[in-house]
Amino acid sequence: MTKYVDRPIPQISLADFDKRKDEITRQLCEAAENVGFFAIIDHGISREELDAAFSLSKSFFELPQNVKQTVALTPLNAGYECRSQVRPSTGVPDEKESYQLQFGENMGDRWISDEHLPGFKQSSLAFMHRLQAVSEKLMICVARGLGFPDGYFVEAHDVSRPNCQTVMRLLHYFEVPKETAGKVYHRGGVHADWDFITLLLQRQGQPGLEICPGREVVTEWAKGHAWTKVACDPDSIVCNIGDLLMSWSDDRFKSTLHRVKSPEDEGDNYEERYSIAFFNQPCTDALIQGPQKKYPMVTGQEFTANAIARNYKALQEATNGAKA
Ligand SMILES: O=C(O)CCC(=O)C(=O)O
Ligand SMILES: [Fe+2]
């Protein structure tokens, strides 16, 4: 049985943003320093827009496998993958499929064609811009909180530039058999995100996301630690700090371990699950260094490459360890 502990996940309203920037900055900094997760409400994206985005996602995942494979995942994190993401924490692929969409040149020819899904690219990009607009509000507050000019992080994540690396990820977790016969079906193994801030959208009645604050446990992938269930409210956007912002804030803001629970305990969600994650990533030439200069300056490209290499190394160690 998993150990659980109730930790409050702060809720932050973005209503009257222009008038309330300083108040929101205070709330956001407190959440980022202590929990690493918070939920935003009054973000301006309507229930209809959210429903439409999930319908679009479903229409993609319902395509035949050979059609989805026409946009197979590239090393630049664009395109479709199925049961291929292996987390260092588990050593086996997550029971899911996902489609990574980017604004910039990394996307190449990985958009599903209009022939298969008319208007998919246009509708997805329009929705990505809506999530970008919400992200930019958070970036302004983070900049204020860290003593940078308001536009500092917005410029570093400018999605109108071809070298932008921001990703919207459509996720579909497969149904898990109720009789697991001892097999653990990992949905989203324990990990921390390596981006700036992640925005996560969930569907009513499709829970599963759990967090484990305490960066010190990262090397053990939170095994044996107490988890907190994140409420599955379709009107709020769950946000978490990623490794990039942790580093860019000289470790003041915490990138938090999280997972999508493997259904195995009483009351777990065994049904299929859809979610949408929006990973704010810097332009490749953005220069990254915190106000106290705790870490050497790196470019956006170097930061992302280092994160991928670190993950790969951890994976090698985990899978070699499992074989030994
Ligand atoms: O689907 C979810 O709820 C979380 C997804 C996630 O953590 C990720 O893709 O990094
Ligand atoms: Fe994540």
Image (tube, rainbow, N blue to C red):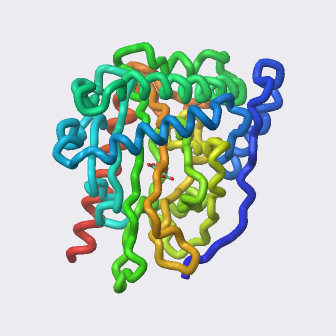
The front one of 243 and 18 is 18
Query: Residue 318, located in which quarter of the rendered image?
Result: bottom left
Residue, x 66% and y 43% (percent of image)? 235
Residue 213 visible here: yes
In the image, residue 100 sits, relative to residue 5, either above or below, namely: above
Q: Is residue 166 left or right of residue 267?
A: left
The front one of 210 and 163 is 210
Residue 246 place in picture, x, y as percent: 56, 41
Query: Residue 48, located in which quarter of the rendered image?
Result: top right
Q: Is residue 258 left or right of residue 141?
A: left
Q: Quadrant of the N terminus?
A: bottom right
Residue 233 place in picture, x, y as percent: 66, 51
In the image, residue 196 sits, relative to residue 182, either above or below, namely: above
Q: Is residue 279 left or right of residue 112?
A: right
Residue, x 42% and y 59% (percent of image)? 188
Query: Residue 293, located in which quarter of the rendered image?
Result: top right
Residue, x 35% and y 47% (percent of image)? 98
Residue, x 38% and y 75% (percent of image)? 177
